[in-house]
Image: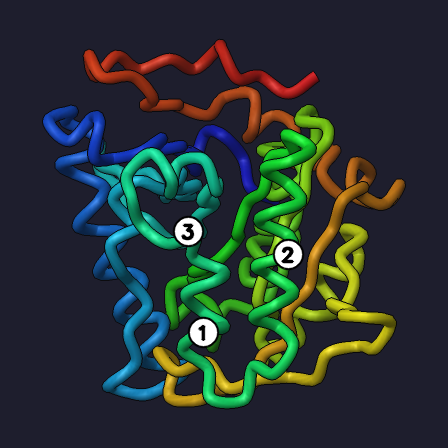
Amino acid sequence: MLQPSEYQLVVLECPYRIWDHELVQSLFPKMVSLKLKGYQTAYGKYCMPIDTTDFIATHLVLCSKEAGTLQPIMAFRSIELNRCDEYNVPFSALSLVKAAKDAGPLVPYVEKSIAECKEAQVKLYYISSWTIRPDIRTSQQTLNQHLTSLFASLIWFQHHQQNPIQLIAAASIQFRVTHLLGLLGFKMIQYEGVECPSFGVASLNQTRARLMDVREFSTYAPQLAKKFQALWENRIVVADASGNIDSDDQKAA
């Protein structure tokens, strides 16, 4: 199990706003290195797992505690539509499907979701860029399983208190992420009553993925997350322009 004595969860809320904070300066480049190594191992040398939205997204980073330092071993990001609008960048889910050669109805689906969420004042997020350190994924099976369960749990911890909400994610078929997200209540995207097929992710050398979304988490999601409660409650949140660390304001209920 992942014990707070050995691991530290850090939440970086919009690194652009808190760029001078020591944890951002320390962890952000390490996180980028983790993602480059993880994605290049999985998808090939010329994939691109990072982009402009990394500077404005919320990053959830699990670190191992090693000789007084924090070393990222798993990370993913969540980006809100309102944040993208605030910084005048395209919503990540829309950029993803527009770049795909075979997105088909996924483009009008995401465009419709954006319009509907703005109209109804529903918070719309895109979850992406999940990475586990390659040596853990390939040679430390038990730890890899714990990290996989933690990833799903952190999606719930980070978002379950917000309502109404819609989360969109592109689930890699290769790594059975569709099944993992399904445990949280994510479902395959349907457009005009028809389930949308897989598509090739342009930035990941055309690896196949399915677009999924969730508006209400499954009853299993909090059960899965319960075993990581201590880790969540001991998280460090770096979230404001002054660079203050706050570990208490975002405690899960």
For this view, does 125 lie left or right of residue 130?
Answer: right
Q: Residue at x 61, y 55 (%)?
A: 168
Q: Tell me which amino acid carries mark 2.
A: Lys
Q: CA distance from mark 3 to mark 2?
A: 29 Å
Please name which of the two marks, 1 or 2, marks the residue nearer to the observer: 2
- Mark 2 neighbour class, 10 Å CA radius: few under 14, some 14 to 19, many 20 or more: few
Residue indicated by mark 1: 98
- Mark 1 neighbour class, 10 Å CA radius: few under 14, some 14 to 19, many 20 or more: some
Q: Name which of mark 1 and mark 2 comes first in the sequence.
A: 1
Q: Are marks 3 and 2 in contact (CB under 8 Å)?
A: no
Give residue 112's mark: 2
Q: Residue at x 28, y 62 (%)?
A: 50
Q: Residue at x 49, y 30 (%)?
A: 4
Q: Are marks 1 and 2 in contact (CB under 8 Å)?
A: no
Give residue 60's mark: none
Instruction: Give the answer, above or below, for where 77 lies relative to 206.
Output: above
Toward which corner of the image does residue 12 lie, by quadrant? top left
Quarter of the figure with the N terminus: top right
105 or 149: nearer the viewer: 105
- Mark 3 neighbour class, 10 Å CA radius: few under 14, some 14 to 19, many 20 or more: many
Percent across and percent down for residue 128 are 48, 58
Q: Name which of mark 3 and mark 1 comes first in the sequence.
A: 3
Residue indicated by mark 3: 75
Percent across and percent down for residue 134 are 38, 71
Q: Tell me which amino acid carries mark 3.
A: Ala
Secondary structure of residue under mark 1: helix
For this view, does 208 lie left or right of residue 86?
Answer: right
Q: CA distance from mark 1 to mark 2?
A: 14 Å
Q: CA distance from mark 3 to mark 1?
A: 25 Å
For this view, does 132 lie left or right of residue 46?
Answer: right
Q: How many marks?
A: 3
